Amino acid sequence: MKHTCTSLILAGSLLTAGQAMADDLFQWQNNSLTYLYGKDFQVNPRIQQTVTFEHADAWKYGDNFFFLDRIFYNGQDDSNSGPNTYYGEFSPRLSFGKIFDQKLELGPIKDVLLAMTYEFGEGDNESYLIGPGFDLAIPGFDYFQLNFYNRQTEGPRAGDNVWQITPTWAYTLPVGSSDILIDGFIDWVVDNDSNSKGTYHANLHINPQIKYDLGKALKLGAKQLYVGVEYDYWKNKYGIKDNEGFKTDQSNTSFLLKYHF
């Protein structure tokens, strides 16, 4: 599975970079930088500051999402990574509707895709995910995606033949002269404790951001500068089972400042 997923991810990346750039097949792209400051984290040091680069794009045959976190532990050392670390994900999806030039619509489903993700971090920390994805038309939402992954986790918490359900969404609420944007994701690794060969336990990660469009309010440009909060709930963080001796259930709120370019 590891080599298959890696090959597919690399193929999707190369296809996107090669064809899209050579033939001008990009439809849109967006980049952003985010600053987060929060307390009450678990497993790692309690206080963290994070700088995140994000890139999203759509092209003729699918879409891509990439982010890279640089995490600082506010002067403390993590037992595994020291005073700071990094973590990232690359998530290409190939659209069957776009590839075959057909409308694959049924009820709320407006497209069917092959979804892939490569997760990476400092040290022996990699995961490979692949499975079906769906774009859904849900009234009121800017977008709603639902991906189902078979995942393999490498390293000390290795496990395979486990499934992850990942919805992502965005919802805009007009407020006065500006907007509030509520977006985020849920990663739900389900029913895998009996299947996993290692110690990667079932876990639930809910991560919404609530952001005020400050740029629009100040007439500097809409959808460029946001201020708000990010809430992070993670049951059995990193797939480590919560217990009395080692708490891994996380619930915290971070201040957020985000700039799109």
Image (tube, rainbow, N blue to C red):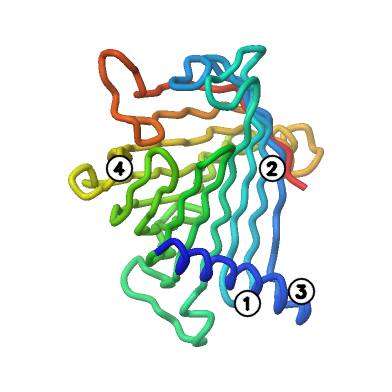
Callout 3–callout 2 Cβ contact below 8 Å: no
| Quarter of the image where one finds residue 203 | top left
How far apart in space, not on screen, are marks 1 and 3 (Cα)?
11 Å
Q: Residues within 10 Å of mark 1 (few under 14, many from 20)?
A: some
Numbered tag placed on residue 53 in the rendering: 2
Residue at horizontal 63 percent and vertical 67 percent from the top: 13
Numbered tag placed on residue 198 in the rendering: 4
Name the residue beneath numbered marker 3: 21
Sequence order check, earlier mark of 4 and 1: 1
What percent of the width, then of the height, locates residue 60?
62, 77
Please indicate whether residue 197 sits to the left or right of residue 19 in the image: left
User: Which numbered mark, 4 or 1, is in the foreground of this view?
Assistant: 4
How far apart in space, not on screen, are marks 4 and 3 (Cα)?
41 Å
Sequence order check, earlier mark of 1 and 3: 3
Name the residue beneath numbered marker 1: 60
Q: Residues within 10 Å of mark 4 (few under 14, many from 20)?
A: some
What percent of the width, then of the height, locates residue 160?
32, 53
Q: What residue type is labelled 1?
A: Lys
Callout 4–callout 3 Cβ contact below 8 Å: no
Q: How crowded is mark 3: few (under 14 residues within 10 Å), some or many (20 or more)?
A: few
What percent of the width, then of the height, locates residue 19?
70, 79
User: Which numbered mark, 4 or 3, is in the foreground of this view?
Assistant: 4
Q: What residue type is labelled 4?
A: Gly
Callout 2–callout 1 Cβ contact below 8 Å: no
Residue at horizontal 58 percent and vertical 54 percent from the top: 90
Q: What residue type is labelled 3?
A: Met
SS for callout 4: loop
How far apart in space, not on screen, are marks 3 and 2 (Cα)?
21 Å
Q: Which of 69 and 243 is in front in this view?
A: 243
How far apart in space, not on screen, are marks 4 and 1 (Cα)?
39 Å
